[in-house]
Amino acid sequence: MSREPSYIEQELLQGLTSGDAMAYSYMFKEYYHALCYYSARIVGESGHAEDIVQDVFEKLWHKQIAFENLRHLKDYLYKSTRNASLNFLKGMQHSQERQAIFLHEQEETTAPDNLELIRMEVLREVCREIDNLPEQCAKIVRMSYIDGLKNEEIAAQLSISVQTVKNQKSRGMKLLRVRLSPAILVLFTLFTNQQ
């Protein structure tokens, strides 16, 4: 027996079907960062991943698909991003090796779709809270934990000291520990350590 969607969920899904820009904007804000992270894991480059995810959302806007529920929408976003990322790799030279590695990793996972959905949801929660951090702190936390840059690389890019980077990361993580549930923090730590 399937769960009836909430009034807000129904309104959101109807808005996407009817081309409501507010509903579309909400979905973009909620899932963009998590989908970029997922795509970057496949294609290996965040710039290409952002383009891929923007294309996925553009297709969503033009298709105006009627989704049964929020899970159906999340599945669509995840699978569309995955397929678009793999298609991007197919078009690149020397992509066969990277694609084979990714597919092999996916085969080894017992439930890749569920694991990636969990990863996407965790990242969505974390990105939402990172956006609420003070500006420089948020930028440094994102560069470190989402983009995977080392302290020295962040310091060089932002023209600040390595110690400032360390201080801002520590401050950001203290704030995130207060704002996020322990389960989300543990999963986020596991996912970022697997990069």
Image (tube, rainbow, N blue to C red):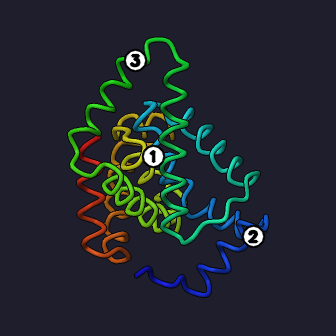
* Relative vertical location of residue 146 with respect to residue 72 in this rendering, above or below: above
Q: Is residue 79 left or right of residue 21?
A: left
User: Is label 3 or label 1 in front?
Assistant: 3
Name the residue type under label 3.
Answer: Gln
Where residue 193 sits: x, y (%)? 24, 46
Q: Residue furthest top?
A: 93
Indicate which disc, 3 or 2, sits on the residue closer to the N terminus.
2
| Element under disc 3 | helix
User: Is label 3 or label 2 in front?
Assistant: 3
* Marks 2 and 1, how far apart at CA: 24 Å
Give the residue displayed 50% in from the left and 61% down from the top. 74
Residue 37 circle label: 1
| Element under disc 1 | helix
Where residue 114 sits: x, y (%)? 33, 57
Q: Residue furthest front?
A: 1
* Marks 3 and 1, how far apart at CA: 21 Å
Name the residue type under label 1.
Answer: Tyr
* Relative vertical location of residue 170 with respect to residue 142 in this rendering, above or below: below
Residue 22 circle label: 2
- Quadrant hosting residue 135: bottom right
Residue 88 vs residue 164, the one in the foreground: 88
Within 10 Å of disc 3 (Cα), the crowding (few <14, some 14-19, many 20+) is some
Indicate which disc, 3 or 1, sits on the residue closer to the N terminus.
1
* Relative vertical location of residue 177 with respect to residue 107 in this rendering, above or below: below
Indicate which disc, 2 or 1, sits on the residue closer to the N terminus.
2
* Marks 3 and 2, how far apart at CA: 39 Å
Residue 166 vs residue 69, the one in the foreground: 69
Give the residue displayed 32% in from the left and 32% down from the top. 103
Name the residue type under label 2.
Answer: Met
The residue where tag 3 is placed is 96
Give the quarter of the figure containing the C terminus: top left
